[in-house]
Image (tube, rainbow, N blue to C red):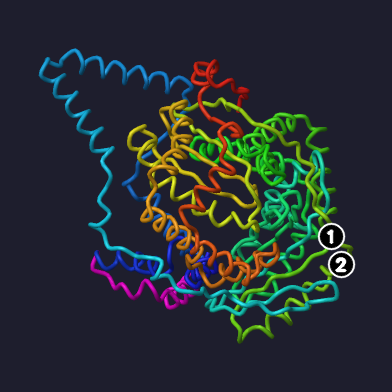
Amino acid sequence: MLHQLELQQREVGGGRFPYGLQLMLRVLSPGLQGGDPMAMLDLDPVIERMRSDIRDDRFIRRLVQEQLLDNPHRVRLTMYPDTEMSARLAARERARLERIRAGMSKEDERRVIELTLELKKRQETPDDPEVLPKVGREDIPSDIPIPEGQPVELAPYLGGAWYGQPTNGLVYTQLVVDLPPLEGEALDRLPILCDCLTEVGTGERDYRETQAWQAAVSGGVSARSSVRADLTDLSRTPGHFVLASKALVRNVRPAGELLRETFQAARFDELERIRELVSQMRTYREAQVTGHGHVLAMTAASAGISPVGWLAQRWSGLEGLRILKYLDERLDDPQELRRFAEQLATLRDQVLDAPRQALLVGEEERRQELEQALREVWRPLAAEAGPRDFGIRARLGPVRQGWATSTQVNFCAKAYPTVPQGHPDAPALMVLGPLLRNGYLHRAIREQGGAYGAGAGYNGDVGAFRFFSYRDPRLIGTLEDFDRSLDWLAEEATERELEEAVLNVISDIDRPDSPAGEAIGTFFANLYGRTPEWRRAFRRRVLAVTLDDLRRVADTYLDPAKAHVAVVASPQTLQAHQDALKLEIISV
């Protein structure tokens, strides 16, 4: 526990929540409560004192007794699933509205109509942007800092990159393996392998002992797969398996041993554990449907456009959830469970037999020490292997789908085939998303249509431009608003709205990350051809986008007749709109 506390104290965060703001919020509470704010930033003395306290084997038991068992200030909350809850809430709301309507006078009705018209007028009245401070393109720096890596050789056939960054005593290590060609069930099992690999035992340890080992020497171990499209050819899809960890510098050797053993000796003979993990994955994925319905709808809509889009639907989309549910039900059969565990072991062995490289991020003055420790530990990971081509044999084609699930609201998406990220039109497509979102979609779909949110954006790996709505009471009207936004672009979009959209894209490109995050992001950008030179050139092209560029790419690629459509909604809603939309209805 103290080890994990020290990791949390030392790690320099960042990303979408700047590290300085994190520190300010950390000191806010003691400052408001009369404590010492600076003490919250210097936990080293506290950790040292606790190291002394825990030498008393009664320390934890005493805390549990005083703070939990003898503490009368408690609430027990029990929640049960109820399949009829949505219908009961809807009936209650209808009854409430009927009571209100029955008690209204003619004057009340007139006033409601007046307020409705006033609201409509207010929603349709353009905001006055001149009341706000303005930042223009002239305020944008001409260049962005990008970390520079240095080649590193840990063993024959195990090279990689080193990035010296101010990581405050932490070292980040990643093993990056070329994905071998995979098809059928093996391809579908890869994300499950990633989720299971770090949750089962290793070597002679069972999963509980391995998890204790992880907590003792590292900040955790994670596995994932990474697949991106080539900059100029959407059919070329290099992919990698990534095993990652972080640790305090003093633990780099045992953390390296942990990563090596996880990669080489993860145990797939713990059948009950594997069965439990798959069940947990299913439960988690099912619970995410309504919270991420807009992402799932976009993923489904773009599944027929490109190999990366098709793969995203099978790995993280609704089709992937269907595959996972079917697998979970089959694993109740002991023979199927044993066969599945053997599949995972075979798939891991395929990954083991592929070329690999290492990524190291740490403080520059520690480089020699860290490299030497990992050379000794990771030498067995070196493997001579020929290049692998992770090609995806995707089944592409038009999509018009309605995904039926338990929800009271809708999630709508349209996707249009476009171009890869290296195409000259990619910067304009990137700017087009925030322009349509802020200029038209937010007003039409959120403010007037009642949805929680709406937007549009370009994905260069999928090669698609996508519209979406989030928690939307409408369906057909929203799909029509997606098309109307293109009419607005042609007739009403202004230079000011263009500048706001350009600034929006640049803010995403320039958003600071943590020191380690910037290095890791740069490494993987280089891995997929997005070199610093390419990134800077792309940024310059974004700054040069014009309204004529946006109208041209919209006319070129966003033909409503070529749209791929996907909707996540209730079965009743989909059936009610089936005559108009003619969707293939699929049950989640």
Which residue is more in the foreground, 445 or 551? 551
From what the image shows, is residue 435 above or below residue 91?
below
The amino acid sitting under disc 1 is Ala
Asked if labels 2 and 1 touch by Cβ distance under 8 angstroms, the answer is yes
Asked if residue 174 lies left or right of residue 499, the reply is: right
* Residue numbers of the magenta segment: 33-54
Check residue 37 for magenta coloring: yes
Residue 188 place in picture, x, y as percent: 74, 41
Q: Which residue is mark 2?
A: 383
Label 2 Cα crowd, 10 Å radius (few <14 / some 14-19 / many 20+): some
Q: Residue at x 47, y 77 (%)?
A: 48
Which residue is more in the foreground, 49 or 251? 251
The total number of labels drawn is 2
Q: Residue at x 23, y 57 (%)?
A: 131
Q: Looking at the magenta stretch, what is its main secondary structure?
A: helix
Asked if residue 191 lies left or right of residue 74, the reply is: right
Res 64 quadrant in image: bottom left
Residue 520 place in picture, x, y as percent: 62, 67
Res 245 quadrant in image: bottom right
Residue 107 place in picture, x, y as percent: 10, 19
Q: Which residue is mark 1?
A: 354
From what the image shows, is residue 197 above or below residue 244?
above
Q: Residue at x 52, y 61 (%)?
A: 542
The amino acid sitting under disc 2 is Ala
Q: Which of the marked residues, 1 or 2, is nearer the chain's N terminus?
A: 1
* Disc 1 to disc 2, C-alpha distance: 8 Å
Secondary structure at badge 1 equals loop
From what the image shows, is residue 195 above or below residue 504?
above
Asked if residue 45 lies left or right of residue 425, the reply is: left
Q: Quadrant of the C terminus?
A: top right
Secondary structure at badge 2 equals loop
